[in-house]
Image: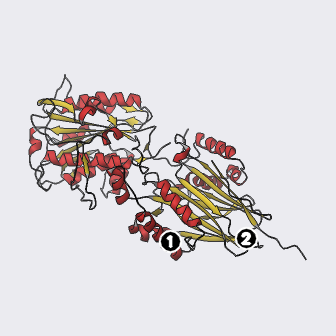
Amino acid sequence: MNPSYSQAPVFSRQTPGCIVLLVDRSDSMGMPWAGSEGLTLAQGAARAINKLLFQLCVKSTKEAGKPLRPYFYVGVYGYGLCPRTGLEGVESALPGALAQRAIVPLPELADSPIDVRSDPSADALPRRSRMPVWYEPAHGFRTPMCAAMALAGAHVAEWARAFPRSLPPIVANITDGLVTDSPYQGVDLAGWAARLRSVRTDLGHTVLLNAFLSADPAPITAFPAHVRDLPEPAPELFAISSELPEQMVRNARAEHIDLEPGARGFVFNADLAMLVRFLEIGTRYEVRDG
Amino acid sequence: MADRVTTAVELVAFAVAKAGSADAEWEDGTGYDPGDPRTGRPARLVVADGATEAYDAAHWVGQLVDAFLAPDGRAPALDPAGLDAWFGRQQQVWAGAPRAFATVFEEHKFLESGSFATFLGCEVHGLGGPEPRWVAAALGDTVLFHVRDGRVLAQVPDLAAEDFGVTPDGVSTQPGQRARMRGALRTRDGALRVGDCLLLATDALAEWVVRAVRDGDARWRELTSVDHPQVFRDLVDRLRAAGDVRNDDVTLLRAHVTPTEAGVLVICR
């Protein structure tokens, strides 16, 4: 049945969204992030992640005094230093017992912040005074990005089987470095990324977004359609990034970002403000029940 | 000498919540004041539609509907200046209401984006006499259709089918939105006869009516005669199942001009 009315893709209680963040926790994430208020890359990434989770919670708030609506499932994975074990690897970075379940309904995460702090946001909202914190920065060891894609892919596939009528999962990878575990179990980064992107619902394939952070001031390239002139690791990250779905194209254009046909979900040399915008553009869909 | 024709309006409202939502989650609002032909107070009709992502839209819609129908002078004049001032008063009432936020997310949403609803207000003047007139003001994609002999004589706002589903205009709780609201407000009026019908419909149903009229699909005329809430619900279910109407809250307020004594409002859900 083709509806005769215009129908934008939506998240709803019946067809929730799945948003998964992969966060580089390698040693180099401890470097200062130029132009980001004295934050390290790890601290800036944590601020962007907490801001995104906060925005999703706000979006899921409908009625006064009522629980959040389960419009989203979320997962956060760190790779590099695993604070729970003190070793190198990949682990869920969700707080407390939620880490055992990997991808959880957002209302459960909303109820489980590590802390609530006064924390200026990246866009300096003037009136906010309290900000829940779910994700803490960490850094150490190398960059096992393949293992992160493998673990996230397994959980995303499980989620997609449970919600086949939903929009496909969105996975955003935030990194500042070169992958150090490729090949992993005989498969290189491109292979693990392809496996992750192959996970699908009835409405399409998993969307993989990649944000490369630059500690030093450098020209930002957002949502490119090619990377002919960019240095490593831009070509590799560009190659594993999904072409932007129509909704994300609309989101980017609403932010006055010019896009060429074939633009991909990739940003190179992102500063903190661009990382926040990148995550917003990649996750902004209407929520509507029904 | 011919008898002088006296007119009245017979009113009925129907509402169906989104499929998959409880009836209590219906976020539209509608109501009617029959007016008083003896004093010249016009009849008033109102429909509002809370935005899906707005904060506590049901309460904002309820406030707008109640205030529009208030008999104590809180109702607005249906002209741009009167409505602009009334929107400002409603924003003040909203901001000044005592609130206790259950979560930091509620507080943030209240402060940063607030609530939002489309609004359609209508007055019918001259009831009791032979030449009643309607005047309507619309902000957003809740639509009034003036129907005579199975044809749409007038529509406010004048939206094409493609205009629905995009970010609609509406009444915001944010004072900073007043200028935008002034620019988006649409008003129109028209003369009524016995047998005419005013249909006030929220966006999902209005979009279907606009498309049906454009395409010569006569099924929309069922809205001028449907007389039982289950019949209306069945119609909406059929339209949703056929992909003709999006799954959204649906509200229809109908005023039928009759030569007899007016009925009373019944909201059928």
User: In this rendering, does residue A192 appear at all?
Assistant: no
Which part of the image, by quadrant, shows the N terminus of chain A? top right
Q: Position of residue B90 (x, y in %)?
A: 47, 67
Which residue is nearer to you in this view: B31 or A273?
Answer: B31
Residues packed near mark 1 inside 10 Å, few (<14), some (14 to 19) or many (20 plus): many
Q: Position of residue A93 (x, y in %)?
A: 22, 36
Q: Position of residue A107 (x, y in %)?
A: 35, 40
Q: Residue furthest top?
A: A185
Numbered tag placed on residue A183 in the rendering: none
Q: Residue furthest right?
A: B1
Q: Position of residue A82 (x, y in %)?
A: 15, 32
Residues packed near mark 2 inside 10 Å, few (<14), some (14 to 19) or many (20 plus): many
Q: Say what amino acid the circle numbered 2 marks.
A: Leu
**Eyeballing the image, is A161 above or below A59?**
above
Q: Earlier in the sequence, mark 2 or mark 1?
A: 1
Helix, strand or loop under label 1: helix
Name the chain under label 2. B
Q: Say what amino acid the circle numbered 1 marks.
A: Trp
Q: Which residue is mark 2?
A: B127
Q: Which residue is mark 1?
A: B86
Looking at the rendering, which quadrant does residue B44 occupy? bottom right
Helix, strand or loop under label 2: loop
C-alpha distance separating marks 2 and 1: 25 Å
Which residue is nearer to you in this view: A159 or B215?
Answer: A159
Residue A211 left/right relative to B228: left
Name the chain under label 1. B
Marks 2/1 in contact by CB < 8 Å: the verdict is no
**Eyeballing the image, is A104 above or below A216?**
above
Residue B53 left/right relative to B216: left
User: In this rendering, does residue A128 appear at all?
Assistant: yes
